[in-house]
Amino acid sequence: MNIMKVTNYNKNRQTRFIIPGYLLKGDETWPQEMCRDMLKWESVNCIAIEWTPGVRAPYAQAANNARVVAAQVAHMINFLKSAYSQTADKFHIIGHSLGAHAAGEVGTLIPGLARITGLDPVEPYFQGADDAVRLDTSDATFVDTMGHIDFYPNGGELMPGCSKNKGSPNNLDDIWLGIGAFDGCNHARAYQYYSESALKAQGFVAYPCGDKDSFDASAAKFNLTSTAPDTKFFLHTGPDAPFGRKGMLSPGSTYELFIHSDKDVGEVTEMTFRWNNHILNPIKPKYGASRIEVCPDQRVVVPPAAEEVCYPELGCFSDLPPWGGTTERPNARLPWGPDMEIIPDMNIMKVTNYNKNRQTRFIIPGYLLKGDETWPQEMCRDMLKWESVNCIAIEWTPGVRAPYAQAANNARVVAAQVAHMINFLKSSYSQTADKFHIIGHSLGAHAAGEVGTLIPGLARITGLDPVEPYFQGADDAVRLDTSDATFVDVIHTDALPFERNKLGLGMSETMGHIDFYPNGGELMPGCSKNKGSPNNLDDIWLATEEAQAEEEEEEEEEEEEEEAGCESALKAQGFVAYPCGDKDSFDAVSVSLRRDVLPCAGDSCPLMGQSAAKFNLTSTAPDTNVLPSTPARTHLSVVSFTYRARVLLAGSVWPNLGSLFVAMKGDREADRGVPAPHPNHPPINTVNTSTLRGMLSPGSTYELFIHSDKDVGEVTEMTFRFKFCTEETVRENVIQSVLP
């Protein structure tokens, strides 16, 4: 149990054991790879068995060693049944070659297994042998291959891309141990096909037929109705990965197909077709459609089915609106079981440094940038450098690395788990909801909103570029909004619409008490414009090969979001934001430095990130859209550091029309100079020229801001240059240095 506690084993999932047999040279780790493929699409426990020394023995010895492997797997299953109160129908055994018969032996030892899959079960010592020795239908409720259903891809004898086996049956040990001309290609195809089927099941459609010759003769004319119990199933595959195919297409034949959609397109006016040529015979001409018949009277409108799944301690989840079947969320999905099990246990809490007097922050990731999957832990470390808080980073990689619609719904279970943990902490430490702050990125931002729905009165929720698809325009119950916490702040970094030629993955609409749009919220400095098609949402989300280029573009913008959130914990002063109506207005005034907008007076400029909660929402003018009763749309300039200086002018008693320029130096590096803003009295505020000319009055104090993309450290010197119609005190365009 000590070992099990450090795994992500979940008793609510199905558990699969993968037992290898014949080991193809250079491909010995295929069971582990098969587990990884399964976890991309399903929420299961997957255990790959390693018994290389026992299988790489003379064949007769290896065949008997498999019995011990079976006994060990059965022993492990009995342990899991006892420790987690599981039943035999929660287990599926997959075995290849000798491993297939070992799987059958497991079924003999553990009656009632849900399923056994045999991948090309080995023949010598087993074919024609007693059922007690080999895999058969009595070994599990459902046995595929040598069982309730048997598949024969390509007739089951010679696989495309493989050569005919060579050697002598008298040299069985040499063949088994990889000595000689036998290459094992045909035998290995079984697990290669099965691994691919976990990702692309539709590529392995099989047809019932009496034998291979009958299948080859009429592959396209099968009646896919119920078949006799002893019917074999045949299919064709390709010679190289991906092996899966759609089926045989025969010229002169008519095919009926159904197109399923969540939209009513009305009267059909046009149909388009795209063909994939015969994969095994590329010299044949491509097919074409000679006649199309559309049957509108057979159109069927299928109402959403009321489905529900429940998990202990977390509650029940349905796929009905607003969670599915809506315009914004067309593909209804039930969430998978928990990817992480949060087990409230005071014994565990006692060995942590959890302190009930501190604020507690949960960080929930969403989109996972390759190579930066541990950013929540890094963010916790950054926070702990400057603040005394409890910080908990959530890990739900299997649930988030799923097809997008599935991942969007899996986030609901994550939210329920976080809420369950918060309730435990509230009860155990006599804490209140206002001691908790949830930070969520991408899908995690909306999961944070769901936590706020389940735990009313949270102190704060921070949304880091909340994801757009399935959420923008959706019901407030589905997405993050201001009702989810006392203070909700949101940072938008990829807010272009998720449509062709734009492909912004983040939401654009305001959704918090204050919304930050750094650099306009759409395209971040250092990032390229996103490319791709909104029709490839799953590819973009999962970073498949087809969408790799687009994915890299998206990653850059998501990385900006995470880095800004982390960096703001350390250097809050580097993220001063300005209230403004929209990006164009901000860009215009940030160049001209109009005093009525930039810089801010008093504390009317919030700090994006960790210090945003210090901002007083009532301190800004109504026309900036920063109102206590409405979300604040706040734009952040491209610069990272802002320095404020006050300058007392000396000289003649009369004012002069002119401009003031200032620069500064620090103990790290020198910074560029910028024109000084207009001074703090009404006559100057009315000046609006490109040269920033204004009345400069001796004896007056002027406040100005210097924006920089560099941290100059401690300011050691400031220099001034005046340009106006006088030569007293300081001559025009002569630099004056003043030490602090």
Image (spheres, rainbow, N blue to C red):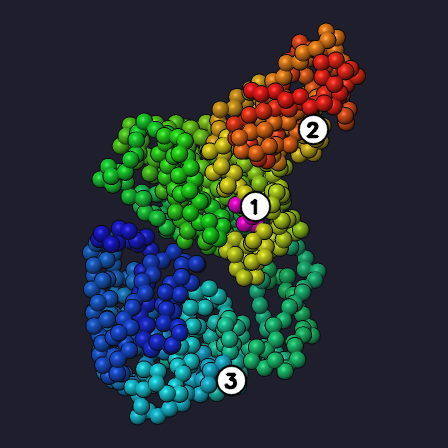
Classify mark 3: helix, strand or loop.
helix
Q: Pointer 2: what residue?
A: 589
Q: From the image, which quarter does the C terminus lie in?
A: top right
Residue 631 is situated, as x and y percent measured from the top left of the image, at 57, 29
What's under tag 1, amino acid-wise? Glu
Judge whether residue 301 is colored magenta. no
Considering depth in this image, is 425 or 703 the residue closer to the camera? Answer: 703
Q: Residue furthest top?
A: 653
Query: Label 1 neighbourhood size at 10 Å, few (<14), some (14-19), many (20+)?
Result: many
Find disc 3 in the rendering and name its residue.
216
Dominant SS of magenta comes to helix
**What residue do we see at 22% from left, 52% from top?**
2
Query: Does 261 sit above or below residue 19?
Result: above
**Quadrant of the image occupied by residue 525:** top right
Q: Which residue is mark 1?
A: 557
Q: Nearer the viewer, residue 442 or 10?
A: 442
Front position in the image: 727 or 714: 727
3D distance between C-alphas at marks 2 and 1? 25 Å
In this rendering, position of residue 305 left or right of residue 696: left
First to last magenta residue range: 554-559
Q: Using residue 535 as the reference point, say whether residue 341 is left or right of it.
A: left
Position of 8 compared to 383: left or right? left
User: How far separated are the C-alphas under marks 1 and 3?
Assistant: 52 Å
Residue 26 visible in rendering: yes
Whichever of labels 2 and 3 marks the residue nearer the N terminus, that label is 3
Q: Amino acid at mark 3?
A: Asp
Within 10 Å of disc 2 (Cα), the crowding (few <14, some 14-19, many 20+) is some
Q: Up-down: is 591 above or below 93?
A: above
